[in-house]
Amino acid sequence: MQYDLAGWSTVLELMPTAMFVRDAEHRWVLVNRMGCTYFGLSVDDVIGRTDDELFPPEQAARMAAGDESVLRSHEVVESEESVTDPHGRVRTLITRKTCIDLDGEPHVLASVTDISDLRESEAYVRWLACHDALTGLSNRTALFSRIESAIAKAASGGARSVLFYLDLDGFKKVNDTWGHLAGDELLIQFGKRLREVVDAADTVARIGGDEFAVLVEERDDFDAETMAASFVKLAARPFGVLSTTAFVGTSVGVITADASAVAGGELARKADSALYEAKKRRNRYVLYNDELDAALAHRRDVERLLDDALVTGEGLSCHYQPIVRAIDGKIIGLEALARWRHPRLGVIPPVQFIPVAEETGLIDRLGEWVLRTACARVVGVDDLFVAVNVSAVQLRDDGFADMVLGVLKRTGLPPSRLELEITETAIVNADGMAVRLLKQLRHVGVRVSLDDFGTGYSSLTLLKDLDVDKVKIDRSFVQMAPTAEDSAAIVRAVSNLGAALGLSVVAEGVETEQQRAFLCEAGCDELQGYLFSPGVPEDRIERVAQLLPSTGTAVSAG
């Protein structure tokens, strides 16, 4: 069917997409309103003009070549290309062209679909596949791809690369204090700092919440330890976020990808082993060695087995160490101490499994188990209170107070017979929610004891704000007090402070009669230590209470 100019004009106006007709000389003879809207031009701006007059030369040449192809073949031709419109905007178009007869002359009919948004979305998805959306750095996927390439290069005799794993120390406190927007800004700034101290060809990646990785190819003047130390210094500099100043640190694990490296996953695991060791003291770097690998494997074993034990209860128990009144040696309370004996690993010390529980989130379940077990055991022992240690991690759970109250209700232990021991460092680093939870528990009668007092940076203001019932002098001062004047002065000062604030003062780690005599003279209210009794299994509580005389004679653990 043949149409004249007016007929094609009517047809084009019915189309829901930009359409136009050009003659064999590449002059525009028709364009519909959708086309005018798309190009931002009026009909008068277009009709009678050629592509050379409307578009950049290279683009006009491509359009003319497409028209010539259609005029020769009389076939439908579809193409995708990026074009610059008369207003300088770059767009991605799908153009479909065919040859039509108009007034007896061949013309090119074209429809144009703008897919710029689609292609931009696709490009962004491809970008996201290998980048971190917040910082713009590489992500874990891109990092591992480059690690594999680095391993292959080293294996073929090329340059070696060094992988650094970094974890920010104190980042959670930034989020808790100033909010996640401040935390996000800090992450962005730290990523920029890392990017500025390495070469453009090196890889900087964000691989987790506050975890980063840097993959650097060795150069003639490169030293891995120097670079690791520079990362620690970068993190130590103050961060200006949301009109305030924030401070964090970083721990760094370092591993070299040399010819012996096998796979990217293995190299990353070793870097993580070194990082785990670095975080034990924080704000430092650790170079990987095989011993670290064994330690990390043991830690993961402990984590898995502890998780199982918390499900079955197998091997877990509580021992109870007496707390005596200083003036007469009478037992007035018991501290519950978590113990774990595994069928294969044997006795696993608390110093090993408690940190693992804190790092992995198992501490909430373990802490609840100890609290429930201790309250249920002591409820039938008249007049004794039970002290249970609480981790700083547990205080981050806004359901902690409800959990404690639920345990008291189920076991029937009066709140006044429960004492929660919180380390001084945990309180210093606690946020407002933790303090609120402890005050909520004190309101119903639960007592709060500040453990390891003297080892942190607490103040009179903190003691008043928290309104604790008791402070517990750290054993390091207790054991040196009779012979070291500085330790003796600290013990006396804490005792005087307790008396002034109406707080009970407990001395832990009492092992000799000399220490006991000094502590009584210094004004301590309660004593605890091997001089009186070690921690004993639950079936020996009553026996210890009967055997322990008022003079403070020691009781064996057997």
Image (tube, helix red, strand yellow):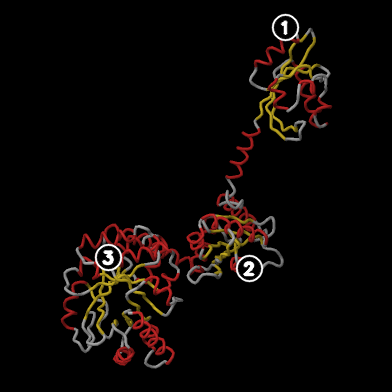
| Amino acid on which disc 1 is placed | Gln
Q: Quadrant of residue 214?
A: bottom right
Q: Foreground residue, 150 or 152? A: 150
At 29% from the left and 57% from the top, the residue drawn is: 311
- Pointer 1 or 2: first along the chain: 1
Q: Position of residue 314 (x, y in %)?
A: 26, 62
Residue 14 quadrant: top right
Q: Is residue 238 visible?
A: yes
Looking at the image, tell me whether mark 2 or mark 3 is earlier in sequence order. 2
| Picture quadrant where residue 1 is located | top right
Looking at the image, residue 262 sits to the left or right of residue 558; the answer is right
* Mark sitting on residue 2: 1
For the residues labelled 1 and 3, the Cα–Cα distance comes to 93 Å
Assess disc 2: are there few (<14), some (14-19) or many (≥20) residues with their C-alpha within 10 Å of its C-alpha.
some
| 521 relative position to 329: left or right | right
Q: Residue under circle 3?
A: 444
Q: Is residue 42 left or right of residue 94?
A: right
Residue at 50% of width from left, 57% of height from top? 179
On screen, 472 above or below 553? above
Q: Residue at x 16, y 76 (%)?
A: 542
Q: Is residue 263 visible?
A: no
Secondary structure type for disc 1: loop
Mark 1–mark 2 CB contact (< 8 Å): no
Residue reaching furthest top? 1
The number of discs equals 3
Amino acid type for the residue under numbered disc 2:
Ser
Q: Position of residue 368 (x, y in %)?
A: 30, 62
**Secondary structure type for disc 3:** loop
CB under 8 Å between discs 1 and 3 = no
C-alpha gap between disc 2 and disc 3:
51 Å
Amino acid type indicated by mark 3: Val
